[in-house]
Image (tube, rainbow, N blue to C red):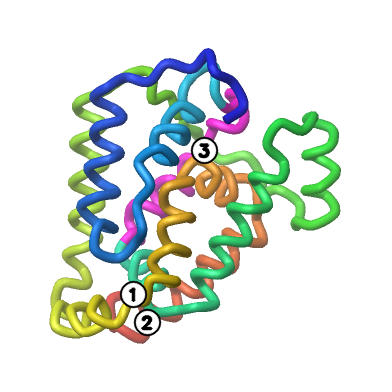
């Protein structure tokens, strides 16, 4: 963690823990300490404001396509590995200077996208009930898109290996690094969008 001055709101942390438990409790190895550390990174005093800022359009996309991304993490080894690589890259930049981070992104990533019309600054030091309900409902609505494939999911869940669960848990529990990867690594975002399009089309839910 980059700064120990961060203070999390208990309700915000409970919501994050509950969502991760609800959707990944049976598919990923969950580390509560890692979740807590990432909640703190999402507070003032954790990541810088720049690193807690997410493109609004991207946030909408991730919420609306949560179910397809979730499915990809369950069944696609390459997809899961790319998530892990993106998270580890962000971890390598943690604590480094802004100039160093900018140079690494220039070297290994495509140019950043144009600024969006609006952005969201994450701050888990506060709690907004209306926003929490909106996020929960949008994730649920996304999951409803893949509900017709429940029998297939049950078969997949029975075949998840400990190694796959550990890899998924690493990515999900380190969600602040993952969010930063989506927002600050256009190559990773572009890759995920391409897989989401392919999977959604294959399922007939595009």
Q: Earlier in the sequence, mark 3 or mark 1?
A: 3
Verify whether residue 63 appears in magenta: yes
Disc nearest the viewer among 3 and 2: 3
Measure the C-alpha gap from mark 3 to mark 1.
24 Å
Q: Which residue is mark 2?
A: 201
Q: Residue at x 42, y 71 (%)?
A: 164
Q: Position of residue 106 (x, y in %)?
A: 83, 49
Q: Is 41 or 202 nearer to us in this picture? A: 41
Q: Earlier in the sequence, mark 2 or mark 1?
A: 2
Q: Is residue 173 above or below residue 109?
A: above
Q: Is residue 85 above or below residue 22?
A: below
Q: Residues within 10 Å of mark 3 (few under 14, many from 20)?
A: many
Q: Are marks 2 and 1 in contact (CB under 8 Å)?
A: yes
Verify whether residue 187 appears in magenta: no
- Can residue 121 be seen from the camera position used here? no
Q: Position of residue 153 (x, y in %)?
A: 22, 78
Q: Which residue is mark 3?
A: 54
Magenta span covers which residues?
Answer: 47-66
Q: Are marks 3 and 1 in contact (CB under 8 Å)?
A: no
Measure the C-alpha gap from mark 3 to mark 2.
27 Å
Q: Residues within 10 Å of mark 1 (few under 14, many from 20)?
A: few
Q: Position of residue 194 (x, y in %)?
A: 53, 73
Q: Residue at x 76, y 52 (%)?
A: 111
Q: Earlier in the sequence, mark 3 or mark 2?
A: 3
Q: Secondary structure at mark 2?
A: helix
Q: Residues within 10 Å of mark 2 (few under 14, many from 20)?
A: few
Q: Which residue is mark 1?
A: 206
């Amino acid at each position: 963690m980059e700064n120990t001055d961060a203070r999390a709101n208990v309700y915000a942390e409970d919501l994050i823990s509950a969502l991760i438990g609800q959707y990944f409790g049976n598919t990923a190895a969950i580390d509560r300490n890692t979740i807590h550390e990432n909640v703190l990174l999402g507070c003032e005093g954790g990541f810088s404001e720049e690193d807690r800022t997410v493109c609004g359009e991207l946030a909408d996309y991730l919420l609306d396509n949560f179910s397809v991304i979730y499915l990809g993490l369950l069944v696609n080894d390459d997809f899961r590995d790319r998530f892990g690589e993106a998270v580890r890259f962000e971890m390598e930049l943690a604590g480094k200077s802004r100039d160093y981070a900018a140079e690494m992104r220039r070297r290994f990533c495509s140019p950043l996208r144009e600024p969006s019309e609006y952005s969201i600054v994450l701050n888990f030091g506060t709690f907004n009930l209306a926003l929490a309900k909106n996020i929960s409902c949008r994730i649920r609505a996304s999951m409803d898109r893949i509900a017709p494939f429940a029998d297939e999911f049950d078969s997949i869940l029975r075949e998840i290996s400990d190694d796959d669960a550990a890899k998924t848990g690493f990515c999900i529990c380190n969600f602040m690094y993952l969010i930063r990867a989506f927002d600050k690594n256009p190559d990773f975002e572009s890759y995920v969008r391409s897989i989401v399009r392919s999977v959604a089309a294959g399922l007939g839910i595009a």
